Amino acid sequence: MCAIVCLMSMSCAMASDSCVGIKGAYWPSDSSFPPSAIDTTLFTHIYYAFLNPNNVTFKFDVDDLTAKLLRGFTSTLRSKNPPAKTLFSVGGASAGGSVFARMASTAATRKSFIHSSIHVARKFGFDGIDLDWEMPQNPEEMEHFGVLLGEWRVEIKKEALRNRRPQLLLAAATYFSVDFFLDKVYRAYPVAAINENLDWINAMCYDYHGSWDTSATGAQAALFDPKSNISSSYGLGKWIEAGLLRSKLIMGLALYGRTWKLKDASLQGIGAPAVDAGPGRGALTFNEIEAFNMEKNATVVYDAATVSVYSVAGTSWIGYDDPRSISVKVKYARTLKLRGYFFWAVNGDHEWRISKQAKQTWDYYQR
Ligand SMILES: *[C@@H]1O[C@H](CO)[C@@H](O)[C@H](O)[C@H]1NC(C)=O
Ligand SMILES: *[C@@H]1O[C@H](CO)[C@@H](O)[C@H](O)[C@H]1NC(C)=O
Ligand SMILES: *[C@@H]1O[C@H](CO)[C@@H](O)[C@H](O)[C@H]1NC(C)=O
């Protein structure tokens, strides 16, 4: 009997909550693209990026202007047809990691942060909170990250019981792999604490190559890399191998590309010699890339080995994803039985060409 029940609850036959696909996207709050322009037929969850705590008290000080933005964001997305769920995302690359390292290191500071985050989520009508700590630097910080998640979930459960509401969602954006195998200081995420306390993680399967290495072009979000382990297939595989539940793993997709200036216009493949960052000082959104390609009559090449696309015009080289490469990646996520995918960031795809392709591919393989 138990065997049957357990089996059923692990399969998607019952369309239980843990089986519903997540189609997420981050909305950068400094973008000129309004939340009202988001096509919610294409996304289930939209992340407000970013809201950060005071670096001394670890509480969220929300000024009037931000309060207005937060309320506008949640009420707009809730009233769309269909409504999208909203989370606010804490952290991000520009916030750095040290504020979270300090916050997570003592019980008192964790408590301040946790209480304030729950208060803000309810006050402004969010469905959940997403922690984008970039990045825990050593094994001790990883341990504190795990402790934080446990205490956070306890408080979320208490609040839900107290107010008779569904629990807030709790998610985190993470490195593409479960471990930082490329760094001098080896460390790995606390997988057991993640399985127990988070609804899911958003694995950032991009930024593998960029203007921090101008010596050669690269596929910044390669699904496969024949020459190294810096690829989404490797990173996602490591998460699963380490025991992360597949129902908690979400694959990151980029609505932007990275650019280089070629050393020699006639040498133009992936890994070609480069001398500098290219157009957009190293990064362009998918919209901008499409406009650039058109204006410069760029040559566009699909690279099946990495599942990525690049365009070349003179010495300008851009590595990115288009609807075709995204479709292969989403199919791959389906094959791995992941929970879903998310995009950074929603303002990069004004005409929804990539977002539509991703949804179609995901829904097709659901059958
Ligand atoms: C905290 O933030 C303030 C203002 O943004 C900054 O001046 C200060 O250096 C930060 N302190 C730490 C310890 O990061
Ligand atoms: C990739 O990682 C595996 C272990 O997971 C290791 O055996 C292999 O040597 C690595 N390959 C490269 C090219 O670093
Ligand atoms: C665009 O490039 C192609 C070759 O890639 C060339 O045949 C064509 O003439 C070019 N068009 C313009 C308007 O430059």
Image: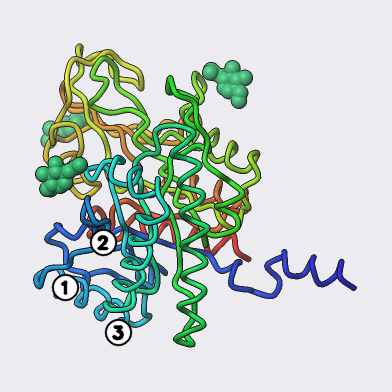
Mark 1 vs mark 3, CA separation in Å: 18 Å
Amino acid beneath label 2: Lys
Q: Which residue is drawn at 33% across and 44% down?
A: 102
Quick one: label 3, few (<14), some, or many (20+) residues within 10 Å?
A: few
Nearer the observer, disc 2 or disc 3?
2
SS of the residue under disc 2: loop
Q: Tag 3 or tag 1, which sits nearer the N-term?
A: 1
Q: Do the residues labelled 1 and 3 touch (CB within 8 Å)?
A: no
* Residue bearing the label numbered 2: 59
SS of the residue under disc 1: helix
Using the image, tell me which numbered label, if any, was put on residue 67.
Answer: 1
Name the side, left or right, on which 60 lies relative to 139: left
Examine the rendered structure and indicate whether residue 195 appears above or below residue 41: above
Mark 2 vs mark 3, CA separation in Å: 29 Å
SS of the residue under disc 3: loop
Mark 2 vs mark 1, CA separation in Å: 15 Å
Q: Tag 1 or tag 2, which sits nearer the N-term?
A: 2
Visual colour scheme:
rainbow
Camera sees residue 289: no
* Residue bearing the label numbered 3: 79
Q: Residue at x 79, y 67 (%)?
A: 6
Q: Does the residue labelled 3 lie within 8 Å of ligand 1?
A: no
Q: Where is residue 298 in the image (x, y as percent from the top left)?
A: 20, 33
Name the side, left or right, on which 213 lies relative to 340: left
For the N terminus, give its image quadrant: bottom right
Name the side, left or right, on which 276 lies relative to 363: left
Quick one: label 2, few (<14), some, or many (20+) residues within 10 Å?
A: many
